[in-house]
Image (cartoon, grey):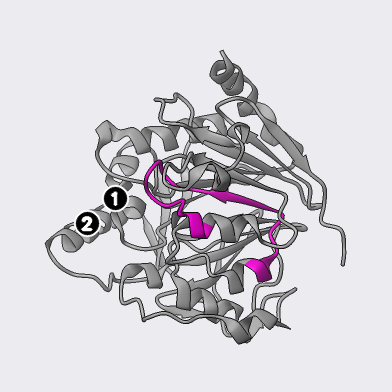
Amino acid sequence: MVVLLWLLMSAPLRAGGALDVYFIDVEGGQATLFVTAAGKSMLVDTGWPGFDGRDAGRIASAVEAAGIKRIDYVVITHYHVDHVGGVPQLAARLPIGTFVDHGRSVESGREADELYRAYVEARDRASHLIVRAGDRIPIEGMEVRVVSAAGQVVQSSLTGGGATNPLCASAERRPLDPSENAQSIGMVVRYGAFRMIDLGDLTWNKELELACPLNKIGSVDLYLSTHHALDQSNNPALVYALQPRVAVTNNGATKGGSPEALHTIRTSPGLLDVWQLHYAQNAGETNNAPETFIVNFGQDLTVSWIKLEAYDDGRFTITNSRNGKTKTYPPRTPS
């Protein structure tokens, strides 16, 4: 009954000038759908292949709830199976305007080559855009600034960034990451006074380059946990500098949601709430969000997302599709 009510209520709500964001539960992968007030759309990553088309189906359900018929931009942050693997199934279900990526994969081998080949085959039936750090993705109705791509980060600070970060003096560096994770497209999305950040699976040292010696990003309203809230990412020097008011974690039941990363996120200065797509079984009750803020506890859900409605004055509302739990956050108070 709750799910049916949610479906009936969600479709017409975009008309009030909000940016709608659907954080779709693809169980430890990523699929995040943005829909502007004018109906323009951007999907970041496509979840897993297989599972009888489960992830493509969940994305299609969010697209239907948003009242749109196509996806204008599909951004592939990097070429790992939980991010790009769902492309062929999704492209078979929905029209896609433009694929956005960082260029060729840095990984090779049978599985990596096959994954990339399947993506390129689908990509070549649409338009294609390669982006670099500092670029903008040209979607009408919101600003999407690329802050990392192809192993590089922005050199100049964004508006609101540029302050010296005192956490840098004690910040830990780790061994270099040669994988696709470090190549991730990371973005800051702005809609009026509202700002959120999505860094894909960007890893520890690259996060540090965004944070040190200057915080290039500034503060954000919403932080989408990097790398599914794994402790290879979510560097405190960056997370604390961002000072998010709310965090959303796209972890699965047993993938991501590490105690260390969740602790970093929960203890970020000024954080009000964490919303989770899954209960993290290995994190313990202390590190998980309250039950009402979690979408999935393992049941087979018809609707599986957290929905955000952001307004240009900086207000935003978040709703849990499982139980209808809704909370509205006022604009950030100027410091």
Check contact, mark 1 vs mark 2: CB within 8 A.
Answer: yes
In the image, 204 versus 87, the foreground residue is 204
Q: Secondary structure at mark 1?
A: loop
Q: Which numbered tag is attached to residue 115?
A: 2
| Number of marks drawn | 2
User: Which residues, given as a range, are shown in magenta?
Assistant: 240-261
Q: Is residue 128 magenta?
A: no
Q: Quadrant of the C terminus?
A: bottom right
As shown in the figure, which amino acid type bears the numbered disc 1? Gly
As shown in the figure, which amino acid type bears the numbered disc 2? Leu
Q: Secondary structure at mark 2?
A: helix
In terms of image quadrants, where is residue 35? top right
In terms of image quadrants, where is residue 139? bottom right
Q: Is residue 168 left or right of residue 129?
A: right
**Eyeballing the image, is 85 above or below 92?**
below
Whole-percent x and y of residue 205?
A: 46, 78
Q: Earlier in the sequence, mark 1 or mark 2?
A: 1
Q: Is residue 175 left or right of residue 133?
A: left
Q: Which numbered tag is attached to residue 85?
A: 1
Q: Residue at x 42, y 41 (%)?
A: 281
**Eyeballing the image, is 25 above or below 263?**
above
Residue extending furthest toward the top? 1
